[in-house]
Amino acid sequence: MKDGKATFIIDFEKMKEKKQIDAENSLLDVYDELFQYIEKKANLREKVRAKHIFSYKAGIPKSEVMDPDMHMHFEHWFAFDYVTVFGSRMFDLFIRDKKDKMSKSMLELSGFLLLMSLEPVRLKKVEKSVIIYDSLLKNETKEATPFIFPAEGEAGELVLMRTVQVGYKQMKIGPTIRLNDEGQQKILKDFHIDEHTNILNQRKHLKEYGIDYLRNKKT
């Protein structure tokens, strides 16, 4: 205290840390509520239709039972990318039904999740708490923190993964698609990026067809 007046020192690092924790808690809330919503609201016919389409895209024979790993890929594709018979995505329907009950931070985050798609990246460093990678779409090096699902892949490997901005961090959402040699070559051929490339069109393409690369999943 100076001259009878209190002196306050703002701890910006602590404020930043709190904001990040709040943002990650919002992601956890959205993620949890989304999959609960799908479990309760998605009708059986829609799920059956989705599984048929997914199996075709991923190259799973009709007689084959989906293993747990593939089922996780299916659940995230069904939640974020699959288009229903009425032309909407499950995540669109979730926001429409829940927006009045969601916090401001959850709604803001939902806007980013809505646009999220599988993205081809070249891994540079893979650790438990951080993934450093080169984005093929943006031609830049980025860093992501795994969320729920662990970091997957090795340095130098070309993979597909979903990421979203959460607070000050980029976070990896859902399982990674690790590609075999044929799949990696196919990605490089399909995504030749230069100054004339329309990135928005590439993202739309990935939103619709990104899961098709599961046919070339590394085993």
Image (spheres, rainbow, N blue to C red):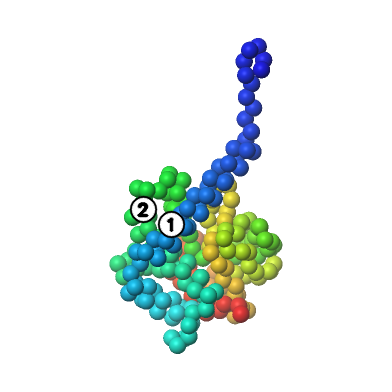
Residue 3 in the image, given as x and y percentages of width and height: 65, 11
Q: Which numbered tag is attached to residue 58?
A: none
- State the residue position of label 2: 98
Q: Is residue 89 visible?
A: no
Residue 218 occupies which quadrant of the picture?
bottom right
Looking at the image, residue 191 lies above or below residue 199 = below
Residue 149 in the image: x percent, y percent? 58, 63
| Label annotation for residue 33 | 1
Is 181 drawn above or below residue 165 in the view shown? below
Q: Residue at x 34, y 64 (%)?
A: 41
Which of 153/64 is in front?
Answer: 64
Residues under numbered marks 2 and 1 in contact, where contact means CB atoms less than 8 Å apart: yes
In 3D space, how far apart are the residues under numbered discs 2 and 1 (Cα atoms)?
9 Å
The residue shown at (32%, 74%) is 45
Q: Residue at x 51, y 54 (%)?
A: 28
**32 left or right of 154 in image:** left
Query: For the view shown, which residue lies furthest in the top direction?
Result: 3
Tell me what residue is drawn at x 40 percent, y 79 percent: 52
First in sequence, mark 2 or 1: give its number: 1
Quadrant position of the C terminus in the picture: bottom right
**Amino acid under disc 1:** Glu
Secondary structure found at label 1: helix
Q: Point out the image quarter for the N terminus.
A: top right
The x and y percentages for residue 162 are 53, 62
Q: Amino acid at mark 2?
A: Lys
Left or right? Give the position of 165 relative to 1: left
